[in-house]
Image (cartoon, coloured by chain):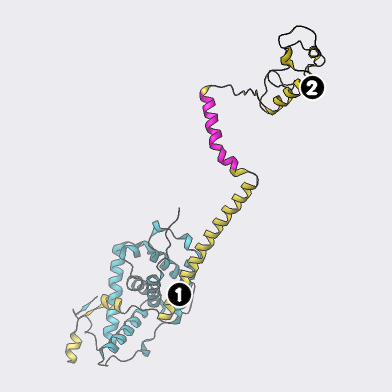
Amino acid sequence: MFSRDPLANAEPLIRRVYAYVAYRIGDGPDAEDVTSETFERAVRYRRSYDSTKGEPIEWLIGIARRVIAGRSGLREVPMEELPETSDPNPFENRVVSAIVLRSAVARLDERDRELIALRYGADLSIREMSELLGVRANTLEVALHRARGRIASRLQARSEDLPDPGSEAVRI
Amino acid sequence: MSRNRKRRSFDLERELRAARPEPGRDFLHALASEVRERGHSRRSFRLAFAVGLTAALLVALSAVGGIGYAAAAPAHAVKAVVSAVKGDDGVTLIQQSPACVQYVTHANSGRGNLSETASGSGSTDSDTLINPHLGNTALGPGEFPTDDCDPGNSGAHNRGGD
């Protein structure tokens, strides 16, 4: 009679939804707005959650996708704004490399960005992605591999701090 | 040095996970607490509504004696089952109803004591007792007006409704 509350432990879910949204549309206020709207809808329609159809994160990501689809003109992080990566400070290097990476993701086409956001932002498994997108797992694996390849190419082309394009040291 | 850094291995999957964007702490806590509060308030509302509705039903039922009736229902059910098993025809003969007691008392005190002439055959005042059930028919001594307190219009047995 009573199904479990999908939002009982909200914080980890917010992190995952936010990461997904930020990979899709860029980090910042827009991502916060979309995340807020996603959870507002989730609270309003929490009774519609069916635990037999998947985990709460899959349900929330489905809502977030609809929220993003309903918005237009969302910002991408332009490459020109990126700082140089020659600073020797490891912490700053890490921050800069994260920004570079997100920017490279932002430059992907929409389909690739969606896959990267689902896999590494929302941290969904291939099976969960397959259920959400209605695509076979093998197809997803191949598509993800290609998306990672494109990111690696962009990173290598942009930064001297990364290995040469085509180098075996890059694991995608 | 520069060359070493250039050759450094770069695990893209690991880096993508590590570079995962994180929400601001204030935003995270504000949204989490809002989700929690709204969830609790809805649950509380549902609980309060259920309790209120139950209380209202109990009050309404008790006002018309429904609770006592409901409490006696199992006993009635058992009685009905027992009588069905025993094979009673469902007719109850009431010998000591309040009406019967009142009637006997009046008959005896107002018109003479029937028991005094129960076996006699002589003519007494009691001989002329009028049976209220049969009109002006005189009763003989010792004749009791009725066995079952029937008011005279429903046959030999009182069906328990009066």
The quadrant holding residue A27 is bottom left
Chain under label 2?
B
Q: Residue at x 35, y 83 (%)?
A: A103
- Give the magenta part as a residue range: B68-85
Which residue matches tag 1?
B31
10 Å crowding of disc 2: few (<14), some (14-19), many (20+): few
Q: Is residue A31 visible?
A: no
Q: Quick one: B26 or A14, which is closer to the camera?
A: B26
User: Does A68 sit above or below residue A48?
Assistant: below
Q: Secondary structure at mark 1?
A: helix
Image hue for chain A: cyan
> Which amino acid lies under the numbered mark 1 shown in the image of this protein?
Leu
Chain under label 1?
B
**Rendered location of residue B104, percent (x, y):** 72, 22
**Rendered location of residue A32, percent (x, y):** 44, 78
The quadrant holding residue A82 is bottom left
Q: Is residue B43 visible?
A: yes
Asked if the magenta segment contains residue B76, the reply would be: yes
Q: Secondary structure at mark 2?
A: helix
Q: Residue at x 45, y 55 (%)?
A: A2
Image hue for chain B: yellow
Which residue matches tag 2?
B110
